[in-house]
Image (cartoon, rainbow, N blue to C red):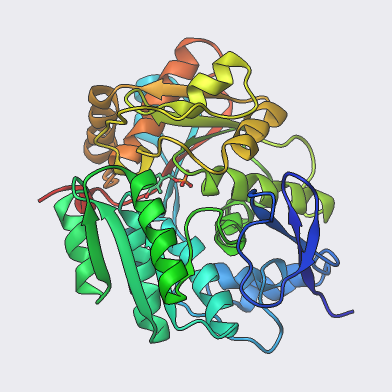
Amino acid sequence: MTRSWSLECSSCGKTRSADGLPGVCDCGQPYLVRYSCAPPPAAKSLLVERPWTLWRYREWLPLGEREAPVTLGEGGTPLLAALRLGARHGFADLWVKEEGANPTGSFKARGLAAAVTRATLAGARRFVVPTAGNAGVALAAYAARAGVAARVYAPASTPPTILRQIRSFGADLVLLDGHIGDCGTAARAYALESGAVDVSTLREPYRIEGKKSLALELAEQLGWTLPHAIVYPTGGGTGLIGMWKGFGELMRAGWVSGSLPRMYSVQAAGCAPVVQAFRAGAAGCTPWSDPRTIAAGLRVPSPLGDRLMLAVLRQSGGEAVAVADAQLAAAAQELQMLEGIDASPEGGATLAAALELKARGVVKPDERVVLFNTGAGWLYRG
Ligand SMILES: *Cc1c(COP(=O)(O)O)cnc(C)c1O
């Protein structure tokens, strides 16, 4: 049977074909990709001979049998045992997924590779993205790889090295005073006037599919088992939502069994709309005014995927935690000095949150816990 996929609105449930360049549903909410069938069991034995990029899971991804992806070798990042860190803090089974090892230095490569692949196959020649930083670098690189144009809107306060990276891949960078929400408004206006494809978080359905590879890869690296707890730095939510979608699909296909991981979302104290909504028992977020944090990727005051994120946290039995900038910076430094991992501030935030969750008894010392260093620390320096 040939596998195909269609799109289903995550809110109203309306479906449509995946033809063309799908944006959001008429109701304003994101579409999710639904496949006609699960990957065949034989897909597992094919893995031994495939390179370690996310396309080794092509039977799980939106890529036809005869289609070629736009790729820089994204995915296949190390899952590192954090023995010294674990010993210091009393974790018996602590791991770090080192996403800084991706092309362009962050896990954004996974989503943009998938989004640029689908859109260019549908004929797109021009792209736009609003960014807190790393999505802009990733779009710039994948657009160059595909030979198409990219416009990036970023806050003027974005770390300078990230801005230099965006320009160096040839993207047309526009700086704005404000945050990623303001950049999103400008990006939508530009998309309307120019016909550029808007690859903002959850405004097209394929970045989520790229991020889903995090779940597949983690499961394979752990011998087709899942950890007890995942601590993830949450901004727009693609990582959290994509991973949860991946775990569910793995479970339904019978590639893993047992319990799903508890998903813990970490935000910066200076921009924590998901934490606030989680604690209030709300279904969606209230926009955060005056968002401030050195963890650029977490400076997302009003995420479009708020309802999906909150549902993941609740369904999984996890929660949301806020950490102060001083804490996340100190934790990032600890990852560097104790494990040699070049942690970004967002990666540091996961360690800071894990310490808090363990101190509160929410995460137990012998549980298998995976932290995500979502980006390389050098992008935030100089
Ligand atoms: C974008 C980003 C995040 C937030 O990820 P989402 O999946 O959008 O929630 C975290 N860390 C880094 C380094 C990022 O670039």
Which residue does the image show at 55% across and 80% down from the upper left? 69
Q: Quadrant of the N terminus?
A: bottom right
Examine the image and state in which quarter residue 147 appears: bottom left
> Eyeballing the image, is 31 above or below 180?
below
Count of number-bearing discs? 0
Which residue does the image show at 62% across and 61% down from the upper left? 205
Residue 84's spot in the image, x, y percent? 34, 32
> Eyeballing the image, is 130 above or below 292?
below
Residue 86's spot in the image, x, y percent? 41, 28
The residue most toward the right is: 1
* In this rendering, position of residue 146 left or right of residue 40: left
Which residue does the image show at 66% across and 44% down from the upper left? 244
* In this rendering, position of residue 23 left or right of residue 163: right
* In this rendering, position of residue 113 left or right of residue 252: left
> Can the viewer see residue 72 in this picture?
no
Residue 12's spot in the image, x, y percent? 77, 46
Q: Is 22 in front, or is 168? A: 22
